[in-house]
Amino acid sequence: MSVRLYVGNLPQTFDAKELEALFSNVGEGVRFKAVNDRETGGCRGFGFANVEDLAQAEAVIAQLNGKDFGGSTLRIEISEQRRDSRGAAGADRRPGSAPTPARKSVNKVVHADAVGEGAPDPRWAGELAKLKNLLANQKAAV
């Protein structure tokens, strides 16, 4: 089972080969991928590394966490699982932020399969109410 490591505090511009060489000094089979900004294409300052097992993950953390790389002190730790799915309502990933409730529809119409006798079809209830108001407000000359 592979272990995913968070690699943070990366410099904005760095040589990927240099970082891979740093990981290869710890052991073979370490795969790294930097997280890039969608708009600029530059590194967002962190990435993820996959290692073969927990023993190798602990070795990487012991040797590289706090090490200077390109003028920045690397922060390496075991990555936590993602808590919510992407695009979920109220998904705010900032630490300490309270979840926001999902937005409710203002003019929600509840549909029913069985329409009661004498009752309007609920799918058209809103439109029927508008028509009734228009008719009530019309003044016809007699």
Image (tube, helix red, strand yellow):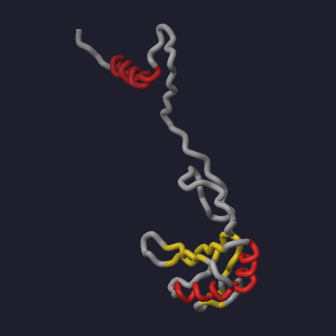
Which residue corresponds to the image point at 63% horizontal and 78% vertical from the top-left? 29
Q: Quadrant of residue 66?
A: bottom right
Which residue corresponds to the image point at 29% horizontal and 16% vertical from the top-left? 139
78 or 75: which is nearer to us? Answer: 78
The N terminus lies in quadrant: bottom right
Percent position of residue 40, x then y? 43, 75
126 or 46: which is nearer to us? Answer: 46
The C terminus lies in quadrant: top left
Decide if residue 125 is on the left or right side of residue 26.
left
Q: Quadrant of residue 6?
A: bottom right
Which residue corresponds to the image point at 65% horizontal and 90% vertical from the top-left? 68
Percent position of residue 35, x then y? 53, 73
Decide if residue 107 is on the left or right side of residue 79.
left
Percent position of residue 75, x then y? 67, 80
41 or 122: which is nearer to us? Answer: 41
Percent position of residue 109, x then y? 49, 28
Q: Quadrant of residue 79?
A: bottom right
